[in-house]
Image (tube, rainbow, N blue to C red):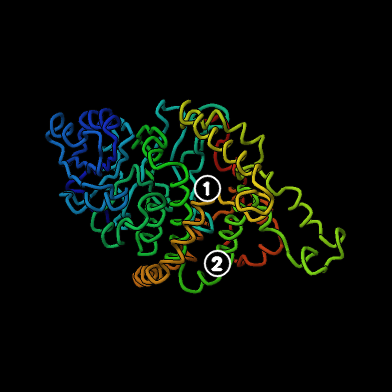
Amino acid sequence: MSRPVRKVSVAVVSWNGRRHLETLLPALAAQDDPGVPWEVLVLDNGSRDGTAAWVRERFPRVRLVESPVNLGFCAGNERLVEAAEGDAVAFLNNDTRPREGWLAALVAALTAAPGDVAAVSGTIVDWEGERLDFARGVMTFDGHAFQLGFRRPLAGPGAADVPPDGAELPFACGGNMLVRRDSFRAAGGFDADYFAYLEDVDLGWRLWAGGERVVFAREAVVHHRSSATSDLLGLYNRGFLFERNAFLTVAKNYEDGLWERMMPAVLVTLTQRTLHLLVHANPGGASLALDPYAGAIADTGGGAAGAGAGAARADASAGTAPPSDVEPPARLRDLPERWRRYGTVELARRLADRLRREIAARRRPAGEPGSGRGAPTLTDERTVAQLRAVSYLLGHLDAVAGKRRAVQARRRVPDREILARFPPWLVATYPGDAELFASPGFRAWLPAEPRLVEARLDEVMELGGGG
């Protein structure tokens, strides 16, 4: 039996996003009648661009909630849910433009769905309406997630595969979803500690584990300026959130027994990615890969012959490894995308700063800190973000264990049923992943169940010039 929707609250969190609201709020005002009363709530999340005053003047019917500081996407939406009058809440990114029938499609889908459906997720396309942003997501075995078909064209050769109305999804996208308020709160809502990213994956898993489902509403379409708001956080600060939140998701949600079997592979992957960045993205980082007892000390190797191929490679590359986690040709290919993201002035500043660090490292005497020819020097921002994520996880073990107990206490459906519907994926994404995932040693740590879907990154999403 379906459950009626009596009133909808549209929740929008905005941090320094007045220019986006100038498009979004008129698009909301132009929505078709969804057949139920509805309201719009905007959280001004510590903005410094005059958002609050502008909303009060231009859109007095919008319910404005203000925070003096940036609470993040998760805690910010929690504030809006607390203030909401609707029995269903539609979460919408501030850098979107919903089509006129967006809200009506969400309401119709949730109203017609069986009573065990807690949330419906709409379609997200790019700003021009030519390429897919989100229709169906998948989770990797270690808690990361992908938007299947991201950046693929919506029509023509190689078009994205968009699921039909009512298709079951492992999670709804937090930038375009309608969820029953009581279900959202009973499941624990968005975890405020996530700040942003993967909070919707975490919520979807908890909804399914609690006996509720998530389905797709194909006609609830919004256009999205991809990463327009998240770019304000900075690329490397986002990397911290991705790594930390992915681990938190699996640490909380894998059921008892399965988590203990999955954890070794998760930890090996996190450790390898961190070490790869330390070794390959920082001056002198190659010295971390040395085995000091393979000929480097105490005459254990009998000179050059005993130094070992690994040590020789490390010596040869010490101080010369590119300050990035990829090889130079790929870095050059990335320049157009980096120019688009940062602009001419900021990109030039970053390149000059990187060059200055490299020159300074090569001028220092061998063995001196920062020389790149002895002790490694931590200069790469992505490595710093990765280490910060590891530091956070180690510093919050007790809190994570407490959250895990709470999540598992309300479980009604075992993971064997959930992951049979939505198998975790194994996708080489980071530098070094392909070698790790192909190794027999890594494979030995993977349990036989759940079955993993193995795919290349280019099979998951459009790479290169697709966006």
Residue 345's spot in the image, x, y percent? 46, 27
- In the picture, the disc for residue 382 is 1
Q: Residue at x 13, y 34 (%)?
A: 56
Q: Is residue 21 visible?
A: yes
Q: Is residue 335 above or below residue 365?
A: above
How many numbered markers are drawn?
2
* 219 sits to left or right of 68: right
User: Which amino acid type is shown beneath numbered disc 2?
Assistant: Met
Query: Badge 2 is on which residue?
Result: 262
Q: Who is closer to the viewer here, 353 or 337?
A: 353
Residue 40's spot in the image, x, y percent? 19, 40
Quadrant of res 126: top left
Secondary structure beneath disc 1? helix
Q: Who is closer to the viewer here, 309 or 196?
A: 309
* 210 sits to left or right of 273: left
Which mark is first along the chain, 1 or 2?
Answer: 2
Quadrant of res 192: bottom left
Badge 1, how many Cα within 10 Å: few under 14, some, many 20+?
many
Q: Is residue 428 above or below residue 406?
A: above
Q: Is residue 412 visible?
A: no
Residue 330's spot in the image, x, y percent? 64, 36
Q: Nearer the viewer, mark 2 or mark 1?
A: 1
User: Which amino acid type is shown beneath numbered disc 1?
Assistant: Arg
Q: Is residue 443 above or below residue 51?
A: below
Quadrant, the N terminus: bottom left
* 114 sits to left or right of 143: left
Secondary structure beneath disc 2? helix
